[in-house]
Amino acid sequence: MAPAPATAEPGPVRGSAYMGIGVLAHDGTSGRTGSLSPEERAGQTEGVDVSSYQRAVAWPSLWSAGTRWAYTKATEGTSYRNPYFEDQYEGAYDVGMVRGAYHFATPDGGSGAAQADYFVDHGGGWSGDGRTLPGALDIEWNPYGDSCYGKSTNGMVTWIGDFLNRYKARTGRAAVIYTATSWWSSCTGGYRGFGATNPLWVARYASSVGALPAGWSAYTMWQYTSSGQTVGDHDRFNGSQDALRQFAAG
């Protein structure tokens, strides 16, 4: 009797993606191995990003450990909402953190403008209170299928532009772009046009931030380690805590 054909491992369920899921899978790294010097660390501010995987986050413990800002996944596509968003978003605020929301982009599941509207309508707004960060667009390797969501480089640039334009029109702030240099090169063709208008949050799990995506000469945030589904990913804001609050205030 012939052996039964091997069955493919099931992929993640739509809605289950988190910041860094595609970067971690594609770049094949398990975490950051280096460390900043005391001088470098003094010029940056520690942060964290969370999603539904973290559920009840121990915000007082993170605050005690020096974490001063946080992003929470609010939405994905045009149908998924993080069921823990409100508790996570307000929990960070209640301990004194500056906090923001992010949207996991699925460009094969609705237009950029439609996804920006869904994000703003379900937690991704902004206010100039000095404690609310501008919304972030998480655009990275597709965990559900084709790396670039079936789009050409021109099609991807158009999709991203539509999202950013709608977000700015709805909130008055330019959205942060979270991405990895490798994805940006492959899926946008190294497009340079957003660097002058949108802050960069770069993902790289190594001892240095490395080469930045085309169009940016500096980063605003750096996701330097990915813990995946455990305690949340760790990040640094490229500036002091006062600079962080100024950035939040717009």
Image (cartoon, rainbow, N blue to C red):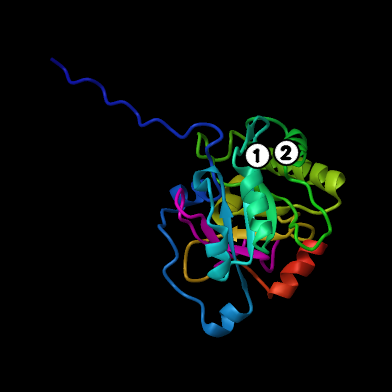
Residue at x-position 50% and y-position 51%: 23
Farthest residue, direction top: 1
Q: Is residue 51 above or below residue 112?
A: below
Amino acid type indicated by mark 1: Thr
Image-quadrant location for residue 85: top right
Nearer-the-camera pick, 173 or 185: 173
Amino acid type indicated by mark 2: His
Nearer-the-camera pick, 10 or 79: 79
Image position of 29 (left or right of 216)? left
Looking at the rendered image, the quarter that the N terminus falls into is top left
Image position of 232 (left or right of 83)? left
In terms of sequence position, does the residue under pointer 1 or pointer 2 come before the other?
1
Looking at the rendered image, the quarter that the C terminus falls into is bottom right
Please tell me whether residue 220 belongs to the stretch shown in magenta.
Answer: yes
Image-quadrant location for residue 70: bottom right
> Is mark 1 in CB contact (under 8 Å) with mark 2?
yes
Residue assigned mark 2: 122
**Marking on residue 153:** none
Q: Is residue 145 above or below residue 202?
A: above
Residue at x-position 52% and y-position 45%: 55
CA neighbours of label 1 inside 10 A, class few (<14), some (14 to 19), many (20+): many
Magenta stretch in the rendered image = 209-235
For label 2, the SS is: loop
Visible in this render: residue 189?
no
Q: Position of residue 120 (x, y in %)?
A: 77, 41
Inter-mark Cα distance, 1 to 2: 7 Å
